[in-house]
Structure formats: structure tokens, C-alpha cells
Image (cartoon, helix red, strand yellow):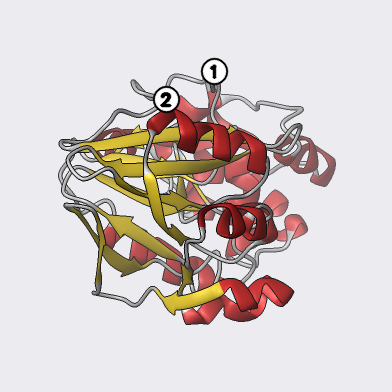
Amino acid sequence: MYTQLEDEFGDIVGKARRGQEMESADVAGKVGLALEDLGRIEDCALTPDQGVIERLAAVLGLHREKLLRSATKQFFPLYPSGRSISGGVVEMMVLGSGFLINGYVVGCSETGKGAVIDPGFDPEKILRNIEATGLDIEQVLLTHGHQDHIGALSEICQATDAPALINGGDLALIGGLANKIEGELREGEVIAIGNLRFEIRATPGHTQGGVSLIHAEAAFVGDALFAGSLGGTRSLDNYRQQHQAVGEKVLGLDEKSLLFPGHGPATTVGEERAHNPFFA
């Protein structure tokens, strides 16, 4: 399981700059950095001094103290593998090799009904986890349509005979796998996994149809949020959209709520409020 965050200090700087469509030369000039040094920072090959970090925070609209703590690696989540929820089973699976993503098997302890969330890679590993839990998989839920989160979709749907659901805004992203989709995840609707209930909340920005699955004790947020960071965006509109959606629909949850992201360790709402530099 994870021993470090998905995004380092340099990743955060790069995501904030690219997401806001800021040119490297402009940022470097405003901060008083050589363009080459900004590149090294974004490549995680250079950690600058406190003054530079504070100026980067000001130029990029990041929280100064939280960015300083990121640079000195003072934050790591208390429960990187997550925890189960009341009446439920949550199996967090790190899938892939080299490039890693998180998939999940989630189930109701009382009914034995379950779902797979984001079957990205390693269908055999996912099926082994399903077998170990003994759950009857009734649906496959996709937080968004990027290929690293749907790579094993066909195999899992075939093995479990479960329908797949995604928000319609991301249907075009999944190409030929669209024939596996048998339902839509719509804002405000509630998905039942046995006796467990998950509200669908739109958290677009990383993709147009990105959603989070919200339970009373936990949220599966896909690539909308990582521990101490955000999923990447490439336009200012998408950056603002994602920032607003995560701030209102995810970080507005109870501080003890677990957050299960698409990459990197699990975290909590309280930890993200305290440590995520993208949020004041």
C-alpha cells in the first residue's frame, strides 16, 4: 500500500500553473526564478527556499502555509488504506504496475450485495478480491471515463454479469467500451449497494462527467481530489469548476468522512481542509 502521496510539492505547483493556463515564463518572472529552475521545481528535482515557496503560493493562488508543509513533506494521511464503513465492506485495490490507480470493491455486510468502482487494470486481482469478500457484484460504477480507470471494465462486466454506469458527460471518453454501459450516474440520484446508499454528486473539471459517490461516512472521489492535491486540469474554466465542486460537494462533508481517491492514499475531509494547498 502507499507510503507517499500521489503528488509532491512540484506536482502541485505544476498543476496549479497549468490549470490556470499560466505560462512558465510569466510565473518564473513574477516569482523571481530562472525559467530553468521553475522547470526543475515542477519536475520535483528542486525544492526552493521558503521565500520562493511563499511567492509561488501568492502567484498561483495556493495556501501559503499548506504549500510550505507540502514542500517539507509534513503531511501524510492517517489511514492511507482507508477503513470500512458502518454495515459495509471497502476493499481498496492498488492496480497496475509502474502507473498505479485505485479500484474498489464495496459491499453491504448485511445483504452481501456489492459493486466494483473504477476497474482500471488487473482484472484477475479484482476478481480475487471479489471472491475473497464473497460479495455478489450487482453493478460497476465509474467515477470518470479515463482509460486508466476502465481498462478492466470488459472483463469485470463479463465475469460478474453486472451492468456498468457512468455519467453521460464522459461516455465519449470510453470509446468502444460504451457498449458495456447500461445506466447513467446523474447528479442528485442515489445508488443502492445492498442497504448502503451513495448520493451521486457531479465533480467535473478533471473530466466533464466526473462524479463522486457520497456515503454518510465516505466518498469515492475518482480523480477530482488526491490526498493533499487535486486531479489535473488543462484549462482555467475546468480548474475553477473542479475547485468549486470539490470545495462545496466534498470538503463540505463531515471532517471524519473518508475520501477514497483514484490515485494515491486515502485521506479524510478534515485532513484535506488542514493540509491541501489548493484550499484556504
Residue closest to the eye, 124 or 242:
124
Is residue 178 visible in the rendered structure shown here?
yes
- Quadrant in the picture for residue 32: top right
- Whether residue 176 sits left or right of residue 189 in the image: it is right
Mark 1 lies on a secondary structure that is loop
Where residue 72 sits: x, y (%)? 52, 20
- Whether residue 84 sits left or right of residue 160 in the image: it is left
- Whether residue 200 sits left or right of residue 86 in the image: it is right
Query: Where does label 2 land, which residue?
Result: 80
Real-space Cα separation, disc 1 to disc 2, in angstroms:
8 Å
Q: Which quadrant of the figure contains the N terminus?
A: top right
Query: Where does label 1 land, which residue?
Result: 3
Label 2 environment density (alpha carbons within 10 Å; few <14, some 14–19, many ≥20): many
Residue occupying image coordinates x 56% and y 39%: 127
Mark 2: which amino acid? Pro
Mark 1: which amino acid? Thr
Where residue 27 sits: x, y (%)? 67, 54
